[in-house]
Amino acid sequence: MSSTDTGKTTGPAGAGEPAGEDVLASREPADAHEIGEAGAQLSTAPVETAMPGSFGGSRAPGAAGWIAWTAREVTGWARWIWRQLTSMRVALILLFLLSLGAIPGSLIPQSGTDADKVQAFKDAHSVLGPLYDRLGLFHVYSSVWFSAIYILLFVSLIGCIVPRTWQFVGQLRGRPPGAPKRLTRLPAYTTWRTAAEPEQVREIALKVLKEKRFRAYADKDSVAAEKGYLRETGNLLFHIALIVMLVAFAWGQLFKSEGDKLIVEGDGFSNSLLSYDDFKSGSLFSLDDLTPFSFDLKNFTGTYERTGPNKGTPRTYQADLTYSEGAYGKERRTVVKVNEPLVIGDTKVYLTAHGYAPTVTVRDGKGKVVFHEAVPLLPLDSNVTSQGAIKVMDGYRNAKGATEQLGFSAFFVPTFAGAGKGDMFSQFPALDYPVLALSGFHGSLGVDAGLPQNVYQLDTSHMKQFKDAKGEIVKARLRPGETMTLPDGAGSITFDKDIKEWANFQVTQQPGSDWALAGAVAAIFGLAGSLFIQRRRVWVRATTGDDGVTVVEMAGLGRSESAKLPEELGDLAALVHEQAPTKPDEDAAPTDADAEPPVPAAEGSKKQ
């Protein structure tokens, strides 16, 4: 995204003086153009402009003058607004607004995920409910204002990336700029005199720089080199990855589907809308997008820690399935575990919950079986203390021969502590000592009205509770195989020995998740590259001095101030110096013949 580089660096030009173009602005105007070229294009970020005045300029008289002035004014303002929209400042503001806009979506019930909670909130808050509704806070992610921020962020990122990408491609295809006349103006600089010929020094420098993976070439009396292009590559990769992530998330939200299904051992599921217990989807999702497949739950296996601080924690928690893809797919077996879903195309089937389904048999007063089914009950705690309802809706007649409906409030514990040992709560999640507590009702369950009803709750508003001759409520705690007899010849209910288990599966279809993951990984690598890689340039000039001795100058310039640039220049100078060493001063006192000439340190580097 757009930003301006105004970093200051220190070096031989003087502490606190600006690098690149700013250096020469404070020195000799004649060299400003050359240093400006040498320091230009270290980044593809365009320079931001200040608030403009009038773009139209002076207005010519007449209608034609007014039209021309208006066109210039509109065009100028449009260009300025576009530059602001694609700037770093505005992009950060949009990202901040997007994060702020997501807060109500996590704190306030959303109609797309739980319409019942939304309605309950409206009923409980007569003032806030209508206000939130007008502001779109019950459907944040599909509201106009959230979508506007999202789209503006897209436009900002794309408008920033496209021109910078073309500019960067042009830089890659071109050459680094030639050396400025005054290398001493640059933040890192070193020089020495050598007996080697200038051409030889330039060849040595070109070879050394290329071995260090610089893009280098010989230019007249100097060698120009540049390195660190991965910084800008990482910057562009980061922003492109952000776009990929935003598109992937938007695509996933629009075309996603998510449903839950509770399945008892021996039962199956087919991926159709009518098969789900609960289903929600994105605004552009179509039922034709459902992946065709089916599966059966053959067995659920759960084992638990028996001792220690983790007592009751699952050790084995898996569902054995047989599944087939498509209408006539080959049947296959698989095992679904927590965080190890069944994957079919874009659809994943997760194991999310488990419980017990006691099998009960209900008979009327004549002994006729009117109900025989495994009834799933919902767990209340980690030890699978469960509660639910048993509903006999058809086929039952009372002792007088009248048609009625039966309902039983059921409370189940897989491991009962025993009579007189506290409340009826399970002591362990496994089936060590199962007990089923029942109390019965007769009358109307309220299902004939056609209104939706919770299958795990019993509506007793039109029912009477069974009572014995003394007027006491008929209830019992049953072990597997035991029967509770209803009063006045109303029949009986038996807790069968066959206790089945159920598993709850979440079936999700969210296209674009792989792209979102790839975008996140690419963004991390891109951000790391843009933060830790420095783009820098090095110039080596070799010329013949007035006394006929070759003068070697080396200088470096980075995008921003860094202590590593002088150090790196010093290392490069040492490599060149090895093959083009300093010429001894003939007027100096004689020294040891075996002593190596000193390597000149780059100015601005750390002193040892």
Image: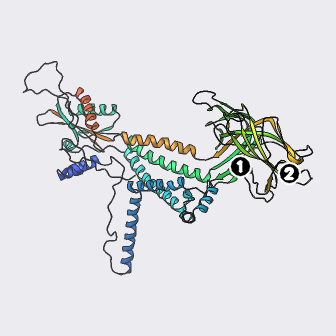
Residue, disc 1 = 277
- The amino acid type found where label 1 is placed reads Asp
Q: Do the residues labelled 1 and 2 touch (CB within 8 Å)?
A: no
Q: What residue type is labelled 2?
A: Asp
Q: Is residue 600 above or below residue 248?
A: above
Q: In which quarter of the image is residue 560?
A: top left
187 or 94: nearer the eye?
Answer: 94
Q: Is mark 1 on a helix, strand or loop?
A: loop
Residue 196 image offset from top left, x and y in percent: 19, 29
Residue 331, given in percent of the width and then of the height, sits at 75, 36
Query: Quick check: can you spot residue 297?
Result: no
The residue indicated by pointer 2 is 394
Give the mark, 1 or 2, whose residue is nearer the N terminus.
1
Seen at 17% across and 25% down, the residue is 597
Marker disc for residue 140: none
The scheme the figure's colours follow is: rainbow
Instruction: State whether residue 148 is above or below residue 288.
Output: below
The one nearer the camera, 250 or 593, is 250
Q: Please give the name of the residue rendered at 33% of the width and 32% of the height, measured from the top-left corner.
A: 212
Give residue 433's quadrant in the image: top right
Res 307 visible = yes
Classify mark 2: helix, strand or loop. loop
Query: Is residue 240 left or right of 77 when viewed as pictured?
Result: right
Q: Which of 76 and 277 is in front in this view?
A: 277
The relative height of residue 383 versus residue 177 in the rendered view (above or below) is: above
- Give neighbour class at mark 1: few <14, some 14-19, many 20+ (Cα, 10 Å): few
Camera-side mark, 1 or 2:
2
Where residue 333 appears, as percent x and y from the top left, is: 72, 33
Q: Which residue lies furthest to the bottom in this view?
A: 62
